[in-house]
Amino acid sequence: MDSYDVAIVGGGPAGLSGAVTLGRARRSVVVVDGREPRNAPATGIHGFLTRDGMPPQDFLATGREEARHYGATFVDSLVVGASGGAGEGFVLELAGGGGLRARRLLITTGLVDALPDVPGVRELWGGDVVHCPYCHGWEIRGRPIGVLGSSPMAVHQGLLFSQWSDDVILFTHTAPPLEDEQRAELAAGGVVVIDAKVESLEIDGGGRLAGVRLADGDLVPRGAVAVAPRFVARSELAASLGVEVADHPMGVGSHLATIDPTGRTAVPGVWVAGNVADLFAQVVSSAAAGVMAAAAVNYDLILADVRAR
């Protein structure tokens, strides 16, 4: 069984940045990655200086190349079990058999977007259906935009997307009833409210969004729709080691709890970074979190070594 200083579980921006940082610190690093990136449906990443518009698969391939340059090893698999601790080291079991050992763990497994259960949403996800205007607002600017109300974030999204379009409709759908003050804010922002349940998103013959079909049969033409997924951290591995899974204070999902800004958890030897810990992290902030966590892991290993002498 191969042994490493650090095992990074998850090969997204946080994991790859952590691998580069630890490799440059002359640590032996393995990245175990199931190759299931959250942003796979997107055509490009945005808001990352010098990488704007870069296809996600190209970004990950470049990150792997850089990490390999500093000695990182990659294992394309899933971790199905973990045991041990910071003292004796961790043992990871891999899907299909086999395993590896590591003195420390950095878990960067990301999250899953639990999309509203409306026909057409998943089919158009990452294209004409989006959730973050800072990620994709520019690409849908000026289009007639619909906001599918499914959470308390509906008003927030409606007002936010009005910055990118003068034609925004909030479909209340299953969102909590709007208060008078919220309706006044939406009206002041130029956002039209349609109090109706949405039946489906209609897709035209070219695979693009045609409009929003209401429960009464009416079709409201739209060029894009914003939704509010529930963000569910891929927390099974960390939770099996005792890391706390906490509900986000804004009610948008669950994440792994940390005890300091570096991503350290309450379980000795285990750090987390990226969307698994910060549900709102974009690619650039996930990458930054990976760097910070890796630096903390490296120093923790230094302390362990000097104290053992």
Image: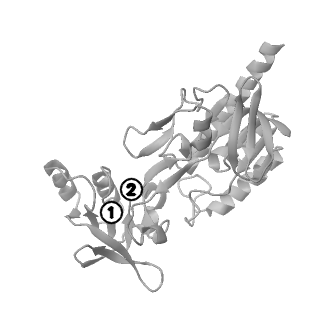
Residue type at mark 2: give it. Answer: Ala
Q: Position of residue 150 (x, y in %)?
A: 32, 57
Near-viewer residue (141 or 244): 244
Residue type at mark 1: give it. Answer: Leu
Q: Position of residue 51 (x, y in %)?
A: 62, 56
For label 1, the crowd category at 10 Å Cα-Cα, with few meaning under 14, some 14 to 19 and many 20 or more, is: many
Describe residue 308's horizontal placement relative to residue 270 as left or right: right
Q: Which mark is residue 275?
A: none
| Residue most extreme to the bottom | 205
Describe residue 165's horizontal placement relative to residue 85 as left or right: left
Report the quarter where the C terminus lies: top right
Near-viewer residue (50 or 145): 145
Q: Position of residue 190 (x, y in %)?
A: 22, 61
Give the residue displayed 86% in from the left and 40% down from the top.
1
Q: Which residue is mark 2?
A: 228
Contact between marks 2 and 1 (CB within 8 A): the answer is yes
Q: Looking at the image, can residue 144 be seen?
A: no
Q: Which residue is mark 1?
A: 148
Q: Position of residue 307 (x, y in %)?
A: 77, 13
Marks 2 and 1, the one that precedes in the sequence: 1
Q: Looking at the image, can residue 271 be seen?
A: yes
